Amino acid sequence: MPKISSDTLWDIAAAEVRSRESRTDEEDAEEDAHSPTQRTVFFMGSKAGGKTTILLRFLDRDETAKPTLALEYTFGRRARGHNTPKDIAHLWELGGGISLSDLVQIPITADNVSSLSVVLVLDLSKPNVLWETMERLLDSARSHVEKVCASHQKTGESRSGKQRVPQVLHKDYPDRELISPFPVPLLIVGSKFDIFQDFDSEKRKVICKTLRFIAHFYGASLIFTSSKLEATMSKSRSFVNQLAFGTERPKSISTDPSKPLAVPAGFDSLSQIGPPVTSDVDIGTLHAKNPLDLWKKVFERVFPPEERKELKDPAKDPQYSEPLIDSIRAQKDQVNELLSLHACVYNPAVKLTQYCSHYLILQSTVCD
């Protein structure tokens, strides 16, 4: 008769933990090599810049791209070989351009930061908002990645170290001491090349050199695409495949401003990029704080940033009017203001006469 174990679930769990802790790094690596991987790729960038089109092309879905509502999720799977478990890619897409940059905290978590990569899509046809879009989104993503990493370090890293610290470039990486690599793998995509190629040649040169510098500064890969040029879409799919499934990264290089750029990370250098393109200004008079700031000042002289328009309250948009609901909402707003005025009475800084006059006006409005 088989012996019945008297171990409790806690005993079994404790034994499993001890077993895992006693494993060597080689044993962990061997197990990981045969286990399916899960990676996260986060798409963000210019509003209506072509993120969804690139994502659908990567997934090989023949669908018409629709506007992304806030933040959307999908996934892709890929088998390494015959009868093997499929690797999984978790794919997040942030819509709305910079207006929803706070949502980066949802797809970037302590659970996936070790396998996270970012794809930044910039609309080449709108250079006047290109720098702000790039700066705001990358700053938001970097800040949250570093926050997640710092938080994890405070609570203690796992023995296997699978929770990634910010990526470290290899010692032979060009200009390693002069750049500031993004904490996770980054791919910068310049979209709508079909429109961009009709720009004045000097403006194309400014945009190309600037984006090459930005990509090199952040340790990122850079490619230009157009939904109307199949070769560029195929290349974008290859780059995203490398981030999502660890396939081999394309190594072909193109730096000609008249053609779609393709510069894998580590294949460019400051000497090859050269200084910023300046024809009417002395660089020494720009008083830049650092190289990135210098390129920004030069770029914005050629492409002045657009004045930010005040965002309209969608609740007041007549396109979405609902008379009954709007009427009730207006009454509630008035009641809320009455309550806030009541609270102000207890603040010595508010005169009682002001409160009374506001109260009488609002009271008569509600009664009507």
Image (cartoon, rainbow, N blue to C red):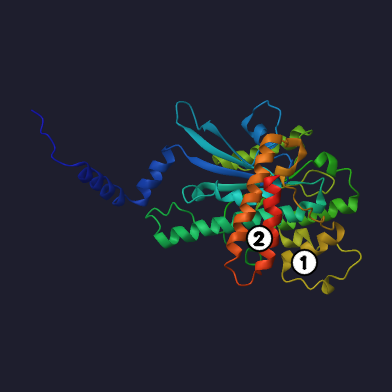
Q: Residues within 10 Å of mark 2 (few under 14, many from 20)?
A: some
Q: Residue at x 58, y 43 (%)?
A: 41
Query: Which residue is denoted by mark 1 in the rendering?
Result: 294
Q: Residue at x 78, y 34 (%)?
A: 229
Total marks shown come to 2
Query: Which residue is denoted by mark 2 in the rendering?
Result: 174
Residue 190 vs residue 323, the one in the foreground: 323
Inspect the image, locate mark 2, and give the three-letter code of the amino acid beneath it: Pro
In the image, residue 287 above or below residue 60: below
Residue 255 horizontal/vertical position (percent): 78, 50
Q: Residues within 10 Å of mark 1 (few under 14, many from 20)?
A: some
Q: Secondary structure at mark 1?
A: helix
Residue 125 horizontal/vertical position (percent): 82, 45
Mark sitting earlier along the chain (1/2): 2
Question: Quick check: marks 1 and 2 in contact, CB under 8 Å?
Answer: no
Q: Quadrant of the N terminus?
A: top left
Q: Is residue 98 visible?
A: no
**Distance Cα–Cα, label 1 vs label 2:** 20 Å
Q: Secondary structure at mark 2?
A: loop
Q: Quadrant of the C terminus?
A: top right
- Rendered image: mark on residue 367: none
Residue 5 horizontal/vertical position (percent): 14, 37
Left or right: residue 60 versus residue 15 is right
Which quadrant would residue 144 be assigned to in this image? bottom right
Residue 210 horizontal/vertical position (percent): 78, 57
Left or right: residue 145 versus residue 352 is left
Q: Residue at x 76, y 71 (%)?
A: 288
Left or right: residue 153 versus residue 360 is left
